[in-house]
Image (cartoon, rainbow, N blue to C red):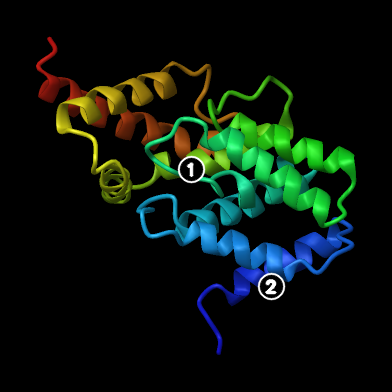
Amino acid sequence: MPTETDDLLADWTALLHRCGAAADPGPYGRELLRRWAQPWRRYHTVAHLRAVLGHVDELAGHAADPDAVRLAAWFHDAVYRPDRTENEERSAALAVRALTAAGLPAERVAEVERLVLLTAGHDPAPGDRDGEVLCDADLAVLGGTPEAYAAYAAAVREEYGFVPEPDFRAGRAAVLRHLLALPALYRGPVARDRFTAAALANLTAELGTLTAELGAP
């Protein structure tokens, strides 16, 4: 029976074949989609995966190895538990295990591992075009309409529903300050032009609200 993720599985299978997989990509893809559909996810869901992959396609002209970026997008939040801090490291390790088992060349596996780890801080080095595309695609949500951004922020809060409100506000404010302190939110020219103004407005507005709620001056 067809499912709403059949197109994603087909894209995954084609991607793995392009990248030289020696094993059937189907089981790996289904396992990844199972992870992305875990019940505690509210923002880091299949919808997020689909959105990031779409943005990677839009920005692929800037990448040195677009398929490595696509692979990294599939794995970048494949391991996600909001009560843990090592999600990117565990996602990268999963990518290494799965892609090595699938028979991909070691150099590409290492590049995917590196890219997944970059999403912990979203601060690729100057000239790292693959890192720029992945981070820009992952952060594109910040540059949406105020309504879309509010829905994103609400979904993140739901994922951290176990955290008391004052602690969540303080932690979320720290995340926003980190993003605003980056040398640039978006590194590639297309993403920079498309998303920067809206993202800065959204982040600044949310941080202002959180700061007021925390009682800061």
* Label 1 element class: helix
**Residue at the extreme bottom of the image, as rendered:** 1
Mark 2 highlights which residue?
A: 10
Q: Give residue 140's mark.
A: 1
User: Residue at coordinates 53% horizontally, 42% vertically from top-left?
Assistant: 138
Which is more toward the observer, 18 or 206? Answer: 18
Q: Quadrant of residue 109?
A: top right
| In the depicted structure, whether residue 182 falls above or below residue 117 | above
**Residue 169 x/y as whole percent:** 22, 28
Please state, as top left, top right, bottom left or bottom right, where the N terminus lies in the image.
Answer: bottom right
User: Residue at coordinates 31% horizontally, 35% vertically from top-left?
Assistant: 202
**Residue 188 x/y as whole percent:** 63, 33
- Residue 69 in sight from this viewpoint: no
**Residue 59 x/y as whole percent:** 65, 46
Which is more toward the observer, 9 or 161? Answer: 161
| Within-10-Å neighbours for mark 1: few <14, some 14–19, many 20+ | many
User: Residue at coordinates 37% horizontally, 37% vertically from top-left?
Assistant: 83
Of discs 2 and 1, which sits in the foreground?
A: 2
Which is more toward the observer, 140 or 98? Answer: 98
| In the depicted structure, whether residue 92 falls above or below residue 85 | below
The three-letter code of the residue at mark 1 reads Ala
Which is more toward the observer, 22 or 208? Answer: 22
- Residue 196 in sight from this viewpoint: yes
The three-letter code of the residue at mark 2 reads Ala
Horizontal side, residue 201 vs residue 6: left or right: left
